[in-house]
Image: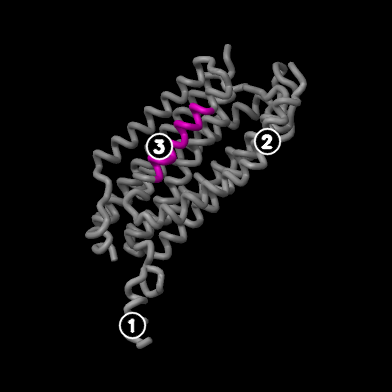
Amino acid sequence: MDAHAHAEGHTASTNLVLGVWFALLAMTGIEVYLAYIHLAAALMLTLLMGLSVIKAGLIMAYFMHLRFERFSLFLTLVPALVLCICLIMIFFFPDGHRLLEMRPPG
Amino acid sequence: MSDGHAEAVAVGSAWAGGVKPYAMSSKKLGMWLFIISDALTFSALILAYSYVRLSTAQWPTPFPFSPAIIFSTVMTFALLTSSLTMVMAVAAAHRRDHRKTVLWLLATMVFGATFVVLHAMEWNHLIHEGLRPWGSPWPEWPDTPLFGGTFFGLTGMHMLHVTVGIIYLGIMAFGFGTKKFKPEDVEVSGLYWHFVDLVWMFIFPLVYLMSVKFP
């Protein structure tokens, strides 16, 4: 079983893994920097979440090895997850905007 | 239709049974499915936090650079580094290098424990300031139970996952060291550990970096 896995799946090299780790640390540093340059809340949230999604993608692709698994696994897991999160968001976003608009000033 | 023909169809399709469509064991696929369901649990918690934050007129932003942001940044680095040592453990397990696998697993547990200890200290600061799941102590913002409730709920759920992960890795280190477990078992525990790391990549900016206290 393992010999088979070895023969079939190409794994990430140590250098690649170190590169991913360093990129994750650097992006975390950028996030902390972004928190301190007084950006508008919506812009900061967008930037932080964008970076976080990239970090999550890197972790799944290289640390969790998803890039080296069959593509069918990715197709089974990720679109379903994204769809479910979007379904929660459908309730969240319109009401979230309403809350923002109706909030008393101050 | 002859039986021969039906058999040819069965062999030709990856979905017809008798083969592994994902080319992985059921243990590993099971862990992936658990991770997706757990990801939805955390998504629901994070979105609930976002919702109550949006609906509260003056959400407290109480985290000063020192200690809260320094602590949480070091915690993030510790968790990312623990993921790196976990990758090393899985690679060593596949080489069947039992000694190195156990050492890398122990290193991963040490970084995980660093995260938990720093987080417990960070909780301690806030509890000493007077933060509770049912109220906030800061005079700058109106008293709200939602800050403490979501903060302790979200980070506590994550800390529980890290703690369970440390125990899980300890069992793996013992079982693989005594040659009870296979390399794949280490790999499956690695999937869980990386997922716990991944979740923190969302909690850290949303809970901490969006609530920085400016001097």
Give the image location of residue B126, x and y in percent: 62, 27
Magenta-colored stretch includes residue B135: no
User: In the rendered structure, which segment of residues is drawn in magenta?
Assistant: A46-60
Examine the rendered structure and indicate whether residue B16 appears above or below residue A58. Answer: below
Dot 2 alpha-carbon crowd within 10 angstroms: few under 14, some 14 to 19, many 20 or more:
few
**Tags 3 and 1 both on a single chain:** yes
Q: Which residue lies most toward the left here?
A: A7
The residue indicated by pointer 2 is A94
Label 2 amino acid? Pro
Q: Chain of mark 3?
A: B
Number of numbered discs visible in the structure rendering: 3
Q: Which mark is residue B80?
A: 3
Is residue A51 rendered to the left or right of residue B43?
A: left
Quarter holding residue B76: top left
Mark whose residue sits in front, 1 or 2: 1
Secondary structure mostly seen in the magenta stretch: helix
Residue in the picture at 35% in, 32% down:
A23
On the rendered image, what quadrant is the N terminus of chain B found in? bottom left
Label 1 amino acid? His
The residue indicated by pointer 1 is B5
Q: Chain of mark 1?
A: B
Residue in the picture at 59% in, 18% down:
B213
Using the image as rendered, state which of residue B183 and residue A41 is in the foreground: A41
Q: Chain of mark 2?
A: A
Quarter holding residue B27: bottom left
Label 3 amino acid? Leu
